[in-house]
Image (cartoon, grey):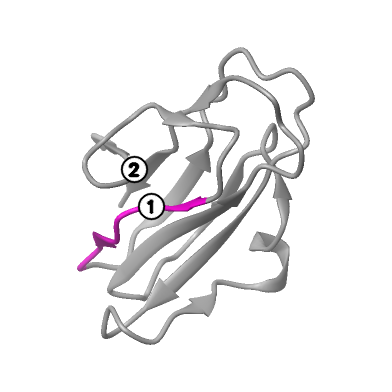
Amino acid sequence: MIPINLLLKVSGITPIDATISFTTDAETICSDYSWALSMGEDSLTTETGTYTVEVSNDNTTWKTYKSTAENVSVIDALDDTHLPWVYFRVVYLPNGETQGTVSPKLTLKR
């Protein structure tokens, strides 16, 4: 098994300023993968940022992946054994973070 690693970006840019709210560009995931997500945080001062994983089948109507993927601490990773949705993105809130960057990384495995 060779994992697929995707750096999630905002308007094609990574790393992303951790002091601002952002939504990553949507990634098209066209298969039933197991997955892992980490935020790749660097030089954060407060580590107060949180993120939510959102999924969609039409790239228009977005839903929170599941309750455990909502308002996750920036220093925590997520994983699951399946991803039956077509599109995947991350919504980040800094919650008072004053410096640093994040580089969200999605790893897909069959």
Q: Secondary structure at mark 1?
A: loop
The one of 87 and 98 positioned closer to us in this rendering: 98
Kind of residue sitting beneath label 1: Thr
- Image quadrant holding the N terminus, namely top left
Residue 38's x, y, as percent?
A: 53, 36
Assess whether residue 26 is covered by the magenta stretch. Answer: yes
Determine which quarter of the picture holds residue 77: top right
Determine which quarter of the picture holds residue 98: top right
10 Å crowding of disc 2: few (<14), some (14-19), many (20+)? many
Kind of residue sitting beneath label 2: Leu
Residue 49's x, y, as percent?
A: 70, 40
How far is mark 1 from mark 2, CA to CA?
6 Å
Residue matched to label 1: 24
10 Å crowding of disc 1: few (<14), some (14-19), many (20+)? many
Residue at 30% across / 69% down in the picture?
Answer: 87
Question: In the shown orientation, is residue 5 left or right of residue 79?
Answer: left
Q: Which of the two discs, 1 and 2, sits closer to the camera?
A: 1
Residue matched to label 2: 8
The one of 13 and 1 positioned closer to us in this rendering: 13
User: Is there CB contact under 8 Å for labels 1 and 2?
Assistant: yes
Q: Secondary structure at mark 2?
A: loop
The one of 36 and 6 positioned closer to us in this rendering: 6
**89 is higher (above) or lower (below) than 16:** below
Assess whether residue 81 is covered by the magenta stretch. Answer: no
The region drawn magenta spans 22-30
Residue at 55% across / 71% down in the picture?
Answer: 65
Residue 58's x, y, as percent?
A: 26, 85
